[in-house]
Image (cartoon, grey):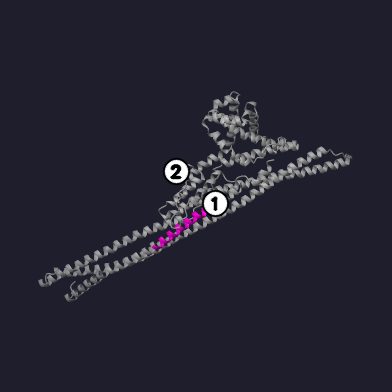
Amino acid sequence: MGKETISENTPSVLPDDYADVRPLTAVPDSTSEMPVYTGPGVENGEEQSSESPKNLFMQAYEAVRTTDKVSTIVDNVAIWWKGRHIDAIEKDIQRLEALASTQSAEASRHEQRLQASNDAALELGRIKNELGVNQVDHSQAANRGDEYAAVKARAESHAATAENINRELAKKRELKEQFERDREGARGRVAERFQNNINANIEVIRNIDSQVDQMQQNLGVADKIVASLQEKQEVARAFLNNPSTLSVDKQMAKSLVQDLEGRIQDMKSAMQIQQEKIAVCDRKKSTLENQKLTWEARIAKKPEQAKVGNEEVSDTEKEESFVAETTKQITEREDALMGDEAETATIEKDPRVVMIEELRDLIHQPELERYDSPDFQDVILENGTPEEKVLVRTYGMFTRMFNFLESSSGHNQESEELDPVSFAREYDEVIDDYIDNPEIALLFDSDNRENIEKGNGTPEQQFLVKLFMFFEYIFSSMDIRTESKKSDKNLI
Amino acid sequence: MMTDPQMQLAGITQALQGADVYLRGVDSFLKQIDMRLQASEAERVKKQVENDIEITNIVSGMHDTARQYFVQWEQVRSSEK
C-alpha cells in the first residue's frame, strides 16, 4: 500500500521555483569590492519581467551590487534583506503548520475509531456471553482483524507524517530566525556607521558655528573702527571747511580726509570678505545638515511592510489539492470498508471527487483503453493529433492514480505504490503543457465545449474537456493567488 | 565743535593706526578660520570614508550570510526528498 511512502516522504514544503535560488553560489567571493553576480537573470529583460521570488531577489541583489553611493545601500539592503524568501519561508511554515495539524487530526481520528471498535467488540462479547452464544465466526474475526490492522496502520502513518512535518517545521523556524537575527545584526551595524557619519557632520557643523561666531565678533570690531574713522573724517572735513583754517593746514586736512576715506574703504572690503566667508560657511552648514537629515531618515527603522503571502502557489497548491483529493478518497473508501454507514452518509461528496469519478468512467471507455498500450503511445507521440498526444500523457497519469486509489480500497492488490506528492510533481509539467496548449484550448471555446459535453465529439475530446473542467474548478477555487500577485506588483 | 587741533590730529592718527592694525590682522585671522574649517572638513571626510568602507564590508558579509542561508535551505529542502 502507498501509505508508508507518504510517511517516509514528508510533503514538499518548497515550490520548485526556489530550487533555482542556487545560482547565488555563482557570486564570487570578494572583500575589497562588492561581489559581482554573473549568473542568469541579471541582464535578461524577460527574466526581469517575471515576478518569481528568484527574479525579485536578483533584482534586489543587482540594485545593491551596482549602487554608486554607499549611502543608498541601507535602502537597497532593506529591500533585499526583507526578501521574498523570508515571506516564502513564513508561508511554508504556515502551510506546514496546517499540514501537521491535519495529519495529527487524522491520526487521532483513526485512533478514536480503533478505541470505539475495541469498546464495541468488548460490548458485543459481553452480550454474547450473557446470551450464552459462544460460537466464534472465524471468518468474521479474521475480517475484523484485517480491518483493525488497516486502520491502525493508517493512524500510525498519519502520526509519522505529522512528526516528520513537525521536525521540518522546527528546522525551518530555526533557519528563519537565524536569518532574521543576521539580518537585524547587519542592519544595526550599517546603521551604526551611518550614525558615525552623522556625528562627524555634527562636529563639523559645530566647528563652523564657532568660526562664524568669531567672524561675527570681528565684524563687530570692524564696525566700531569704521564708525570711529567716519567720525574723525567729519572732524577733518569740518576743519577743512572752516574759513579761518590756514591754507597750509587745509592741505593737511584734505590729505587726512583722503587717508581716512582709504582706510574706511579697506575696512569695508575686509568686512565684505568676512561676510562672504560667513555665507560660504552657512551654505556648507546647510549641506551638512541636509545630509545628516537624509541619513537620519535612512537609518530610522521603517515599519515592516505588510506580509505578502500566497504568491507562487501553483505548484504547492496543485500538490496540496492532489493530496487533499487522494486523502479524501482514501478516507471515503476506508469508511466504506469499515461498514460505518452512518459516518459515510454524513460525508458530502467533494465536487472534485465527483469529477474524478466521472473522469475515471470516461478513461475506462473501450475507445480509450488502447492508450494504455506502449506501442500505441509511441505511435501517437510521433504522429498523433495534439489532443491525442496530450491524452497519451494524461492517460498514464490517471490510470496510475485510479489504480492507486483502487489499491487503497483493497480491490487491486497488484498496483504500484504511489506517493501523491512526487506523483503530482511528476505530472506537473504534463498538466502545464495541457493547459497552455493553444490547440487544445480550442476545444474549450464555449461553443465547442458545450457541443462536446452533450456527447458529440470523440472520446478523447470528451475526456479532455472533462479534465479541463476539473482543473478549472480547482484553479477557480484559488482566486486568492491572482489577487495577491496583483498586490505584489504595487509593492515592488 | 572745535577743540584743540593738535588733539584732533592725534585722535585721527590713532583711528588710522587702529584701522591699520585691524587690516594687518584680518588676513591672518581669516587664514586661521580657513585652516580650522579645512581641518575639520578633512577629519569628517576621513571618518566618512572609513565608515563607507566598513559599510561595504558589512554588506558583502551579508551577501555571504545570505548565500550560506540559501545553501542551508537547499540542504533542508533536499533532505525532504
Quadrant of the image containing the N terminus of chain A: top right
Residue A434: x and y, percent? 55, 33
Whether residue A296 sits left or right of residue A460 in the image: it is left
Q: Residue at x 49, y 46 (%)?
A: A56
The residue type indicated by label 1 comes to Val
Task: Count neighbours of disc 2 (C-alpha within 10 A) and say few if under 14, some if 14 to 19, many if 20 or more.
Answer: few
Whether residue A143 sits left or right of residue A16 in the image: it is right
Hey, which residue is sitting farthest front in the picture? Answer: A375
Main SS, magenta region, reads helix
When the figure is inspected, residue A163 is found, relative to residue A385, above or below; the finding is below
Is there any visible trace of residue A246 in the rendered image? no
Q: Residue at x 42, y 57 (%)?
A: A293
Q: Image quarter for residue A378?
A: top right
The residue type indicated by label 2 comes to Asn
Specify start and end residues of the magenta stretch as a single range: B46-73
Residue B65: x and y, percent? 52, 55
Q: In the rendered structure, find residue A44 and report the number of the disc placed on it.
A: 2
- Whether B54 is among the magenta residues is yes
